[in-house]
Amino acid sequence: MYKILIMGSGFVGQATGKSLSKLGHDVIFCDTDERKLRNLESEGFKTCREKNLEEISPDIIFLTVPTPTKNGQVDLKFIHSAAKSVASKIIKRANNIPLVVVKSTVPPGTTEHSIIPILETYSQKKSGQDFETAMNPEYLRERFAVKDFENPRLILIGSNTKRAREMLCKLYDPYAKKCQIVSVTPKEAEMQKYVHNLWNATKISFFNEIRALSEKTGINPDAIFRLTIKSAEASWNPEYGIRNFGPYGGSCLPKDTVAFLHWSKNHAQTDLPLLRSVIKVNENLRKELAQPKISSAQPAIGDKMHEIRNN
C-alpha cells in the first residue's frame, strides 16, 4: 500500500483520495480551503496544511488543483504553486523516490516543460532519478465523481519512465478488470484530456444547434435524436471518423451537408454555424491534401499508444 498526498481537495481530489482510501492506502488531503479540510476531518480523513508538508513523506503525490481559464487562457498559477510547495517541502528532503502525478487538466507539454522544471528547481533534485512524474487525466462527472473513479471506462497513464508507469499500474490494479490501463507520453495524455472535453462540447453544441432548428420548423427533436443515435455510424461505430482517412467524401456527406445548410438558411431563415464550420474544415482539408507534399506527416497520437493491461 502507498502513502498518498492529495494536493487540492475539490471534487477531483476528494474522489481520488476517498476511493484510494477504500483500497487501504494511507491518504492525506491538503488544500488552502480550511473549510474543505475541516469537512474531511469530520468524515474521518487525514488532512495536512501546506505549512506542515515537511512533516510527511508520501510515495505518490496527486496534483488535483484547479486550472481555471483567465482572459481565454489557462491559468496555471495554482498548479505551479502546488508544484513549488511539493518540491521545496517534500521532494527536497525525501529519502524515497516520490511520484508526482498531474491530474489537473493542463495544456499539452505542461508536465514536461513546466511542472518538471519547477520540481527540479525548487527541490534541487533530478526528475527520473530522485523523483518521478506522470500525467494521469481524470474523466469524472462532478455529481458522480466517486462513482466514476471507482468504475472507470479508461485509465490513462502519461509517463516517460518505467518506474512511474509500474507504480500507477500497481495503484490502479484493483480497477484493471473494469477497463483498460493504457500508457502514452505525458504530452499525449494532456492532449487526450482536452480532446475528450472538446468532443463532449462539440456533440452538445451540434445537437443544440439542430434542436433549435427542429423546434422552429415544428419537428420534435427528441424523437429524431434518439433514432439518430441508433442509425448513425458515428454513434454505433467507435472507430468511425478517428482514423486518418482524410476529408469526408462519398455520395452522401458532401452534398447533404451543403444542401441542408442551404435549406436551413432559405426555408427556415436559420444559420447553422457549426455545420457551416464542418463544411469549411472539410473543404480546407481537401484543398490542403491537393497541394504537393513538402514533408511527411507526424504519426498520429493513437499510433504510439501501448496497452499495458486489458480487461
Image (cartoon, rainbow, N blue to C red):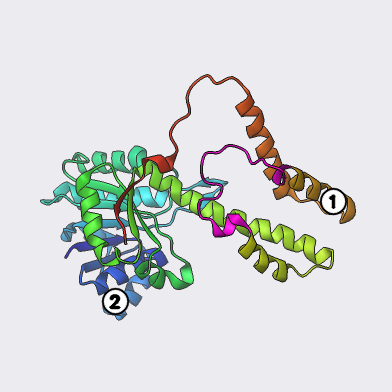
The residue depicted at 36 percent of the width and 64 percent of the height is 13
Residue type beneath disc 2:
Glu
Q: Residue at x 39, y 57 (%)?
A: 65
* 280 to 239, vertically: above or below: above
Q: Quadrant of the N terminus?
A: bottom left
Q: Which portion, as a residue range, is magenta?
A: 232-254
- The residue that appears at 32% across and 75% down in the rendered structure is 40
Give the main secondary structure of the magenta stretch.
loop
In the rendered image, the vertical position of residue 138 relative to residue 44, given as above or below: above
Q: Using residue 249 as the reference point, say whether residue 149 is left or right of it.
A: left
**Residue ranking furthest to the right:** 267
What amino acid is found at the position of numbered circle 1 in the picture?
A: Trp
Choose between 301 and 104: the one closer to the eye: 301
Report helix, strand or loop for mark 1.
Answer: helix
Task: Tell me, yes or no, if residue 88 can be seen here.
Answer: no
Residue 234 image point, x, y percent: 59, 54
